[in-house]
Image (cartoon, coloured by chain):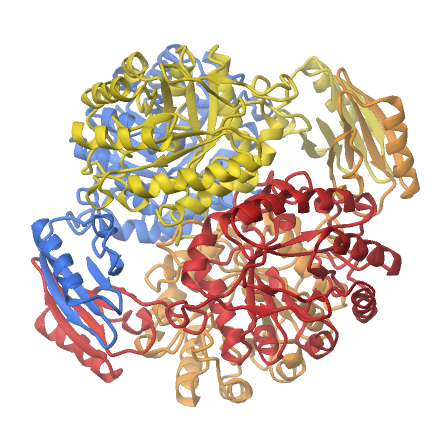
Chain colours: A yellow, B blue, C orange, D red
Amino acid sequence: MLILMKPDATPADIDGVCGRVRELGFTPHLIPGQTRVAIGVTGNQGAIDPSLFAHFPAIAEAVPVSRPWKLVSRDVKPDHTIIPLPGPRATCAIGGGTFVVMAGPCAVEGREQLMTAARAVCDAGARVLRGGAFKPRTSPYSFQGLKEDGLKLLAEAREATGLPFITEVVDTRDVDLVAEHADILQVGARNMQNFALLEAVGSVRKPVMLKRGLSATIQEWLMAAEYIMAKGNYQVMLCERGIRTFETMTRNTLDLGSIPLVKRLTHLPVIIDPSHGTGDYRSVPALARAAVAVGADGLMVEVHPDPARALSDGPQSLTPANFAKLMESISAIAKVLQMKI
Amino acid sequence: MLILMKPDATPADIDGVCGRVRELGFTPHLIPGQTRVAIGVTGNQGAIDPSLFAHFPAIAEAVPVSRPWKLVSRDVKPDHTIIPLPGPRATCAIGGGTFVVMAGPCAVEGREQLMTAARAVCDAGARVLRGGAFKPRTSPYSFQGLKEDGLKLLAEAREATGLPFITEVVDTRDVDLVAEHADILQVGARNMQNFALLEAVGSVRKPVMLKRGLSATIQEWLMAAEYIMAKGNYQVMLCERGIRTFETMTRNTLDLGSIPLVKRLTHLPVIIDPSHGTGDYRSVPALARAAVAVGADGLMVEVHPDPARALSDGPQSLTPANFAKLMESISAIAKVLQMKI
Amino acid sequence: MLILMKPDATPADIDGVCGRVRELGFTPHLIPGQTRVAIGVTGNQGAIDPSLFAHFPAIAEAVPVSRPWKLVSRDVKPDHTIIPLPGPRATCAIGGGTFVVMAGPCAVEGREQLMTAARAVCDAGARVLRGGAFKPRTSPYSFQGLKEDGLKLLAEAREATGLPFITEVVDTRDVDLVAEHADILQVGARNMQNFALLEAVGSVRKPVMLKRGLSATIQEWLMAAEYIMAKGNYQVMLCERGIRTFETMTRNTLDLGSIPLVKRLTHLPVIIDPSHGTGDYRSVPALARAAVAVGADGLMVEVHPDPARALSDGPQSLTPANFAKLMESISAIAKVLQMKI
Amino acid sequence: MLILMKPDATPADIDGVCGRVRELGFTPHLIPGQTRVAIGVTGNQGAIDPSLFAHFPAIAEAVPVSRPWKLVSRDVKPDHTIIPLPGPRATCAIGGGTFVVMAGPCAVEGREQLMTAARAVCDAGARVLRGGAFKPRTSPYSFQGLKEDGLKLLAEAREATGLPFITEVVDTRDVDLVAEHADILQVGARNMQNFALLEAVGSVRKPVMLKRGLSATIQEWLMAAEYIMAKGNYQVMLCERGIRTFETMTRNTLDLGSIPLVKRLTHLPVIIDPSHGTGDYRSVPALARAAVAVGADGLMVEVHPDPARALSDGPQSLTPANFAKLMESISAIAKVLQMKI
């Protein structure tokens, strides 16, 4: 941290601030300037909260200079985190050079719908089945998911196809139940800063995919991952699914521009969700190709046997035929970039 | 809902859409235009999800035309919701013509800090004591609150001052515990779309204050209130605490411009939190005055006996002396607007 | 500026950076830390561009620590800027303790419309007439204003009422013409970073009102004012008219929360425009009251004799009767705050 | 447009609205509903401004249902717009199946800097040289460009390399001068709604590249292009360069997610600028790959012989060596997608 004193700060003001720095266990370093004095602070382990100095009237500004995260940081662990996929078909790992495609319906609606979708995405080359059993919906009057029955259907589909499955958990009280069935737990965008839930999935020993919140900064997103890892669960992957901006013609604004930065900051794998990112099935294939090209580790995409009759997110769901075409198109790009798929 | 067909839609396309409308139990009305046909849909109770029509290729656009909320709507209940304040000093109600000020420290840090703050805000005219026992923090390494011990200290402070207290609940598993002690439950901004928590506080029979999410639209905010009311708890108040925008020199952007609209849309009382809204104690008094002037029903403001040593949110906390001055200043404005305080 | 070296920076790296600092004419100060070295830079007059150091691979971060503006800064000129109003009725000044209300139609549509509006706002107590002659419109097919004829009508209305008038200038080629007629020149939100226009109005010797851009940070807004002042025109006032955010139920998000901060940073007067800020005439009176309460120096509000037939911005325009009521309501609040009106 | 009456609207209210619709030259169509009446409006050529109906108290809502643009619309002109590149090396066209790379320094700083950059980007395969002569800068104290001298140096570089050049025009008074020298005129993000400038470049008969404004919606961006085309200049290309959001770790948020939508809405070519989009040269190559993959028509990228000493935008500029590597990497992806480069 760097503390900037006001131009009219007296020696007594400066002594007062240095005293407070020492009181906190740190070391102050005076830097005299032409018009004012700055005080460098060292000796801290992590970031210092600038607000600890907010009430000294002679301070003009306190500027933090370190990152607040640790376990997620590539400075701490330079090597990529690699998360092996469980199950009979699992010959690959997330973050290990394979571009992993997760696909399936937004919500599990019934056995036939799920089985049709699962077989289709398996045949087309997906590595993980996705499907929502507990659905967070904006309206209390919308379909809320099949809950435990949905989990059981997902387990059946895994049995039938060999694909491990990922599903969302929305309440701390459900974490054990979901962890019992699912291969990967998803924390949704609206729960990204539900810290109780982050701690609960941090206590589980299954991989967790953490979606970026609608208005979460990259720093907050990484801090949310830090919450999970701080509880001992290191199998965390991040998922960019679009942020909220002023633009309303797309459902969200898919922030591909942040991916290279995120990959520099953290060793965790990053998945892209172009279905929520654009909200329109016609835009999904182009963004899926861009996701491979930008250096992501995988894709999460919504596929429904009959999107026009989907109970949730129909407009952004691909048909099985369109999904098969998408797989071909992204495979060609993955090949150019020396990634398996 | 209004469905707009593409210019080149055939009669068969139009018939197909009309058939789907009837299949859903509604009535289609054809509106021929110069270059294309529109179809008005009637007979629905609530809003129709436009995505139900997303996969008809001959449809250009489906435009929803009703609001999705019911219980929160002023169309349904034109009279203001009035929430009586419990406790010996409670001679007023929220939403009933009194401008209710809630004040106290961001976090309960200990008995002395809390008691000093409680007595100060009581003496200056606050009607409700605020204090955080369960603290949602961005970093897992920050102070997380005194939890149950904090609740007990708040109850002690209520005993000593006669002020009812409001405190945040962050996990469905804590709702019963918090409801046992607190007079008003707060759902924080980061949990505004934690639907499991909304349902849990909806099952309690104590007033709930619902903070607007950092990037929540007014519609989402009202839908979150609808979640609570749909479970039978009608004692809901809203709290505007600033939204996230591109501006970083203020902590958040306090959206006072939406308050008159919100008051037209819903019968629920609206509280303003200028402490989080600006993040700077120097801006709090001016925004508190603006909150009265704009027609809000109350204020939530952070007061700490020694802001420079606060464990949380020091920079935005008022000293007791500054809070007393603020009360005088807003009282004068409340009087002009014929509100008690 | 503070330069943070990476943990593995060598003494040679550090020497290299220090050399570059000296080469730029500044003085480097070494601050050794536990894991890395920081370098404080002093001797600069204004802010140093951090990008001057962006390509040293051993630098982790370069943190600027001064404000980039000068002439607009309250550090440089602690007293309020006071801008006298011209014309026969001008017994007050903007920024000098009077809350100045500017009112009139969005666009000048014709003599009768303008005269009716001008007399109405004058009778109700407005101090300045507003009216658009050159209209910046999103669509090339919308009404673009009466241009020079509009200026002449505004001059007629000034003759008739004694009110000075403010009007927008949208092109460098029109600055002389507009300055010849108008009493105050307005630079609109969409032109806030039209730097050629800022320089052109900076060369005029009439007051300028600078609207904040839709997505302009406070810093960019102040820098735009700096452009005008750097050309020698010190009669600048700022106008907050709402910023663009994710919320679409209000036309813009009126950023009242920034006003106390802006008043601390700069000595320039600040005007609030609740008409554009909310886009709905029903919300204008409440926000006008809030504008007085928050400490602004004045108000700009749209008034039209027949809003339902306005060629531009009808939904946010007040009728003369509603404007008269608004004046009463804000006068009461101004009085409490010891402001004239 | 669809007009929704309030539930309690009387037959007289409805007649009044229908009369106004007819008065405007359109045709009203009554659609009776269970709780209220809707009125469909037909007969209009373009979109109807909903505000024309804002002051009828019995109207609940007026919903526009057509797009406001015409000349830019793919509905009007289904074929791609193809813009031939001038000059001796111009064997390709923008929008015609070649992925066109425009590269060069942010600002022209002098002959040697520009010639070095021009030769480097030409050798690596760029098709157009970019370089700023008139620089719009946030601060009046920053380097503002070499102006006319810069244009002459760019013409020299074209002579030497055969590359046509693109440069920005920032003032209506400079349009003729810039058009005399440049092959493509650029309208910058901050001037996207400088309507006077749009009309001025619309009167020129040289191609124009229109950058998206920092907070411009897709609709506003297309309407700005409509301004240029409405003046008779049909050689318009769009450039996505990142929008402003709450995220500050990247300079802007590159909105690749909107590209497929924009390509569906308009026939105009779309160029991506990953330099401004991310603000960090380390992120540029990944985003350039994504730009090809997402279906853009070209790239604009900043290249400087010595980024550490650039007078403007050094942190986001590539070295010539890095640019050559980028060209290889995007060529491989373009090939997969059957595009020339």
- In this picture, residue D199 sits left or right of residue D60: right
Q: Residue at x 91, y 35 (%)?
A: C19
* Along the viewing direction, whichever of A171 and C177 lies nearer the viewer: A171
Q: Residue at x 55, y 69 (%)?
A: D236
- Whether B37 is drawn above or below B128: the answer is below
For the C terminus of chain D, the image quarter is bottom right
* Quadrant hosting residue B235: top left
Q: Position of residue B40 (x, y in %)?
A: 15, 62
Q: Position of residue D298 (x, y in %)?
A: 59, 56
Q: Position of residue B120 (x, y in %)?
A: 46, 26
- In this picture, residue B303 sits left or right of residue D98: left
* Quadrant hosting residue D247: top right
- In this picture, residue B220 sits left or right of residue D283: left
- Whether D81 is drawn above or below A227: the answer is below
Q: Is residue C336 visible?
A: no
Q: Position of residue A266 (x, y in %)?
A: 58, 25
Q: Is residue A98 visible?
A: yes
Q: Residue at x 73, y 36 (%)?
A: C63
- Whether A273 is drawn above or below B40: the answer is above
* Along the viewing direction, whichever of D74 and D142 lies nearer the viewer: D74
For the N terminus of chain D, the image quarter is bottom left
Q: How many marks?
A: 0
